[in-house]
Amino acid sequence: MNKINNKGQTLYYFLIFVIILVISWAMMLNIARLIRNRMILQNEADNIALSLAAYKARVLNFLGGTNYLIGMILSLGMNPRVTQLASYSTDIIGGFPATMNSSYENPLSDLKHKIAANKQNGGVQKIKFIVDTLQKMQDVAIKGYAIYYYNILANNSNKDYNILLFPVHPDNNLGLKRNSKGIQYYFTINDICIYLDYATHFHFLTRSKYKKSKYSWFVEGEKFNEQKVKVVLRQKTDNKSPLFAKLLKIQYPQLVVYSAAAPYNVKGSMFPKKEDTFTGATALTASLVEVSSLLQLAIMTKTVANSSALGPQATPFIALAEAAIAINYLESKKATAQLLSGKDNPIDAYLKAKNGGWAAHLVPYNHTSLSNDDE
């Protein structure tokens, strides 16, 4: 009887085990490569989204700061009405009052002692020039954001992925609009000049329209809170095939990743929520304007008191001057009261939010249907 030879019977099992092991090893390498590529692509998308949101945050900080400066400069504008009064409203912006001492000229004063003509617009012209310059700087900052946005697209166009950015029109994504209340600038006209002594005198003022600007500072638009920047990266065709692709009949799937980032400010937006003409005021500008108005009213009162020495013919002038003093005093108080009314204005909006400052962070992408801004 022949003895059965059992040698080599485990070889088949060993070969099957080796095949399974090699296939598992290949699949692990394929999956690892796929995960690695996706992580790299996701990092790219996150970096792009965060850089755009961070740039947008810097633009919002700049626009908020220049908004404040526009309001501050306009709060120096005064209302030339018999005497120049505090205004704090873009309905009436006149130059700073002339000083009572002819040896000193305020740089923002409309009336200059050293200029012979009664009608001057030097001060209000300077105010308008500064405000116009600040507005142009704001427009440049917004265009700079758009340039940065399109530069991101251009720099990533030759990479191994296709890039999609939303919204398509970056200018609209800031969510801001110009305050359409406008700014009305006025000449200051010196009708009468009443001398009290050699150096001190009082200007009896009226006003005449100078120029009007259609827009003033930025305010929040309807979609201001929709600050999200969305990024989609779609990997181009991968020339490398998976290990044992033909044997296993597999191909790498096309990778698509999504990311989103948005600017935020925990203290507030820095921008007024509504369109208004009220500028607000800083402690410095309020004190400069109020002290100047009260000084002129005091000199008017002194002038009326001294006019009694002129005799009965001065009675109509005294009555008119006293009425002017009363009316202008009430107007000045009314303008000052606006500072405590809590109205929405560019100065207060900035001061409330400046300590927070705009920054940026990643946010959920939200795969719902695209809004109109994204299209």
Image: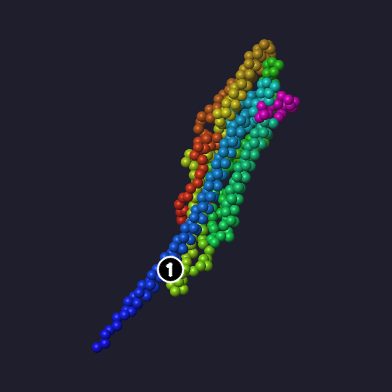
Q: Position of residue 27 (x, y in %)?
A: 42, 67
Amino acid residing under circle 1: Ala
Q: Position of residue 188 (x, y in %)?
A: 67, 29
Q: Closest to the observer: 289 or 23?
A: 23
Residue at 41% from the left image edge and 70% from the top image edge: 22
Q: Residue 87 magenta-drawn? A: no
Q: Find the residue positioned furthest to the left.
A: 1
Residue at 45% from the left image edge and 66% from the top image edge: 30
Q: Main secondary structure of the magenta part?
A: loop
Q: Is residue 331 visible?
A: no
What range of the chain is rendered magenta?
106-121
Quadrant into which the N terminus falls: bottom left
Q: Find the residue positioned furthest to the right.
A: 116
Q: Position of residue 375 (x, y in %)?
A: 54, 55
Residue 24's place in the image compared with 316, above or below, is below
- Under circle 1, the secondary element is helix
Q: Quadrant of residue 70?
A: top right
The residue identified by callout 1 is 26
Q: Position of residue 185 (x, y in %)?
A: 65, 34
